[in-house]
Image (tube, rainbow, N blue to C red):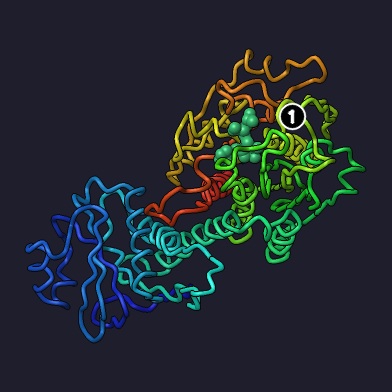
Amino acid sequence: MQINKTTTTFEQLTTPVLIVGVPKTRKNWEAFTSCFGEQVEQWIKAGDIATAEKKITKVPFNSKVERVLFVGLDDAKSLTEKTLRESFGLVGKALREANLASFTLWVDSFVTEEITADDVAYLAGEGITLGHFAVANYKTTSNKEDAMLTSASFVTTADMDEVAAAFEAGSIYGDATNSARDLVNLPPNILTATKLADYAAELAEQYGFDVEILGKAELEELGMGGILGVNRGSVEEPRLITLKYQATENFDDVIGLVGKGVTYDTGGYSLKPRDGMVGMKGDMGGAAAVLGAMKIIGETRPNQNVVAVIGATDNMISGTAIKPDDVLTTYSGKTVEVLNTDAEGRLVLADALTYAKQQGANYLFDIATLTGGVIVALGMDKTGALTNNEDFFEDFMLSTGETDEFVWRLPLTESDKKRIRKSDMADLNNSPGRDGHMIFAGGFVGEFADDTPWIHLDIAGTSDAEAAHDLGPKGGTGAMVRTLASFIERKGAEK
Ligand code: BES
Ligand code: ZN
Ligand code: ZN
């Protein structure tokens, strides 16, 4: 999107659409009224332009400002950043519906005592980009080119350079989240482990990351029995994808992002019921989140080293597939008794996490669509978390507050760990039971973090939306892309 720094007053303005925040009581509207007259004020009073929160009214205007999109702010005093981001999401949707590619934002009309012009511009860049997203499809009946947002301009009394930079920063976050959504939405016959690795390699090329892609033979040589075990039923090769972003001369103080990239989860021999299988193309949501965050890092180049490791494979059935009762040896050397082949994510993550540690990560995140249990516990709109380090988690929660992605921590007790370690045959078992099983799944991954500070994020509920929401359509959401990147950016800035 082209970001223009030229328009500063209404007099100079020509635009297909002007976006205006309209609170119940309007202050500082003289400039607007003196240029466009008292008519608007009458429409608001008559209720033809809504001031209720998140209500959007589109009004045809004049020959220079073709339309105005009024965005209700209610009592602007209680407006939160979350509500404003969502309001801009609705603006993005309205722009797509009306097929409008360029727009002008009257920044000052959204400013409140708490929300500055820069905040407004940032949230607009992010929210409009997210709301404008549409799911790519394969319908032969639709020959419409995908609509793009091509240019943004601003009317503001604040510093134009800063406003434009904030808008751009927000739109980088929105774009990267949308790229993760695209990956989640891709059909599993198209997005194989090999294709996911190709995408990661392209990202590396674009942003100058170090990249390493390991195939089946290399994983066999390394003894990665976790990911290889899951892959055994497939004709598609697995991939272990590693990207490195090096910010400092020595690659130390490294944040590791480990993603579950199961491109399709049938459950294996512990087969999923037919209705539970539909949608399992999204079982690589963790990988998508990691790649989305890396895209932001590539754009913003924070002063923080990052290593991203993705275990990519599908979970299929064949004569060679793993079975319940099999024992696998993971890359760490720890052995696992497989009790349920549908608990495959933790097996893939175990090897990927061990590899991330070996590549120098001394803070670890794993991100995965890991359990139906997290949905039972927290619903579809909350990411479940576990940790082995209170300070790390508390610090991370500050970032979730910035991005308004809801994360809720569950406990991981010694008795939970005992059950993960209970096996007659091996060091661990991959399915201690259904009761509180989000904790068993994440806790299993934590066994491979050892003492390294670690946060587990189960996005099984949040990665895929069952219905359209203010920030986007039904389908992949790009959950945790913004929060992970925001955390890494802050860590870089704190140095
Ligand atoms: N990929 C699933 C988890 C999942 C469920 C993701 C629903 C998205 C939506 C995972 O591999 C799985 O099958 N987990 C099992 C674990 C069980 C076998 C212990 C589950 O949650 O039922
Ligand atoms: Zn599974
Ligand atoms: Zn799975």
Query: Residue 304 at x, y = what percent?
Result: 65, 48
State the image quarter where residue 402 is shown.
top left
Query: Residue 490 at x, y = what percent?
Result: 54, 46
Q: Most extreme residue toward the bottom, as rendered?
A: 63
Q: Is residue 180 above or below residue 438?
A: below
Q: Is residue 395 above or below residue 86?
A: above
Q: Is residue 252 visible?
A: yes
Task: State the residue in front, 48 or 193.
Answer: 193
- Quadrant where the C terminus sits is top right
Q: Quadrant of ligand 1?
A: top right
> What amino acid is labelled 1 in the image?
Phe
State the image quarter where residue 427 is shown.
top right
How many numbered marks does the figure carry? 1
Query: Residue 444 at x, y = what percent?
Result: 69, 27
Task: State the residue in front, 288 or 302.
Answer: 288
Query: Residue 80 at x, y = what percent?
Result: 31, 47
Task: State the residue in front, 257 or 264.
Answer: 264
Q: Residues within 10 Å of mark 1 (few under 14, many from 20)?
A: many
State the image quarter where residue 331 is shown.
top right
Q: Is residue 196 left or right of residue 325?
A: left
Q: Most extreme residue toward the right, as rendered?
A: 221
The residue positioned 23% from the left and 52% from the top of the image is: 53
Q: Is residue 259 visible?
A: no
Q: Label 1, secondary structure: give it.
A: loop
Which residue matches tag 1? Answer: 448
Task: State the residue in front, 276 or 314.
Answer: 276
The residue positioned 64% from the left and 48% from the top of the image is: 284
Q: Is residue 59 above or below residue 295?
A: below
The residue positioned 27% from the left and 48% from the top of the image is: 79
